[in-house]
Image: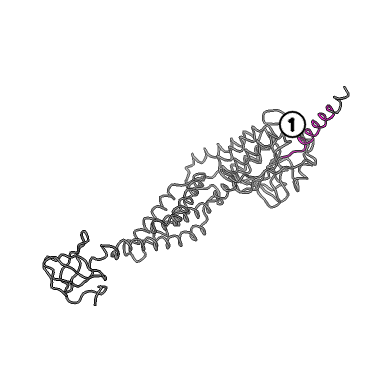
Amino acid sequence: MKRAGPFRWAVVLMVLAGAVSLKADVVRVVIDGTINPVSAEYIERGLARSADQHAQALLIEIRTPGGLVESTRDIIAKILASPVPVIVYVYPTGSRSASAGFYILEAADIAAMAPGTNTGAAHPVLMGTTMDPVMKEKVENDSAAFMRSFAGKRRRNVDVAESAVRQSKSFTDQEALQQHLIDYVAKDTADLLKQIDGKTVTRFDGRTALLHTAGAQVIDYGMSLKEQILAFLMDPNIAFLILMIGAAAIYAEFNHPGAIIPGVVGLIFVVLAVFALNLLPLRFAGVALILTAFILFTLEAKFATHGALGVGGIAVLILGALLLVDGPIPQMRIRPITAVAVSIPFGLLTIFLVNIAVRARRGKVVTGERGLIGEVGIAQSQLRPNGKVFIHGEIWNAHCSSGAEAGQKVRVSAVHDLVLTVEPSIVGAPAGSSLK
């Protein structure tokens, strides 16, 4: 019995330490930017981490102008099914949780905002499409029903929440608190956790959970390296810039076959751009316009249009860039300044490279056997019809069907099996001949 005593105390201390650590944990993820597939994956991993650690709650600090509908629905589905309570906090002061962010805020077990923040403006937007009244009504009704499906169970003011969807209303932190769209206004995370300490939240499935968050240890859970890279690439302006750099590098490889490095770099950049654009709402009309611009650049180098096709190609490229990404908010579309700043230099560079390639293909070959054609030499012996000629510092076997005298100038017309076919040269041979 005496030997078992210390062991029992050790087990008790381990259990108590584990209980204390579980009680103290609040996992925090930070969404700073648009709502997209990367942020949806990040929140999903944060929810899984919170569940694995048996944390008190997952705290989502959010500041976003909005984002994609499908990603928003995916995030909300994960929040509603989470075994761990979810706190959504619009922070810091001066931030907003607009459009898609408003849906996420209303779906939380606890919704909070920092002073000087705002939310709302959640009307659905379809860019690049003129909706008829019936379709517009369908989209609005669908979005409003989606809001009602969870706002009521979260004990939010459903009518006011729906007005943000149908009428694009926005609310300050105090307006949202007074109209029961959020539960708390807190100056910082510590203040928020202190205010919600001891609160019993009713989960979406009807279960209840008692929060003990005063003085809780907040564990930051950041994006993985993959998510950070994808988040960077999913900026439409970055994706378009990478696409153009890749295209320019591939052009350089075509003009200098065997350089290898431009081709490898260009291929990698184009693949990265295509991957990023695949995650964004891509508009194929923009892709078609960009391809049309490449065709115009090539035609400009091939035909003498005095820049008309080149200018047209640059204009089409700018238009294609502006239409390439069909984002629901300005932050998810290519900015005009980016389209112009990238398209003009790229267009000029492309015309220059293609022009060099076309001229090189049209130019006379000046090396090897074909480089001898058209050159002038001197017959070393009589050509009746065969003999020797001196050209480019070398003596060659030659054949002249019309014959030539020794010392007479002859011009090479063909080369076959190291035998030159020549003909007597007329007086006034063109410049560039090997002899004066």
Looking at this view, is 100 or 42 the one in front? Answer: 42
Residue drawn 18% across the image and 68% down it: 388
Looking at this view, is 353 or 399 the one in front? Answer: 399
Q: Is residue 18 magenta?
A: yes
Query: Considering only vertical position in the picture, is 184 above or below 358?
Result: above
Majority SS type along the magenta span: helix
Asked which quadrant contains residue 203, the reply is top right
Please count the marks in the image.
1
Label 1: which secondary element: strand
Amino acid type, callout 1: Ala
In this image, 23 relative to 37: left or right? right
Residue drawn 46% across the image and 53% down it: 266
Residue drawn 31% across the image and 62% down it: 303
Query: Magenta segment range?
Result: 7-26
Asked which quadrant contains residue 39, the reply is top right
- Outermost residue toward the top in this view: 1
Residue 153 in the image: x percent, y percent? 67, 32
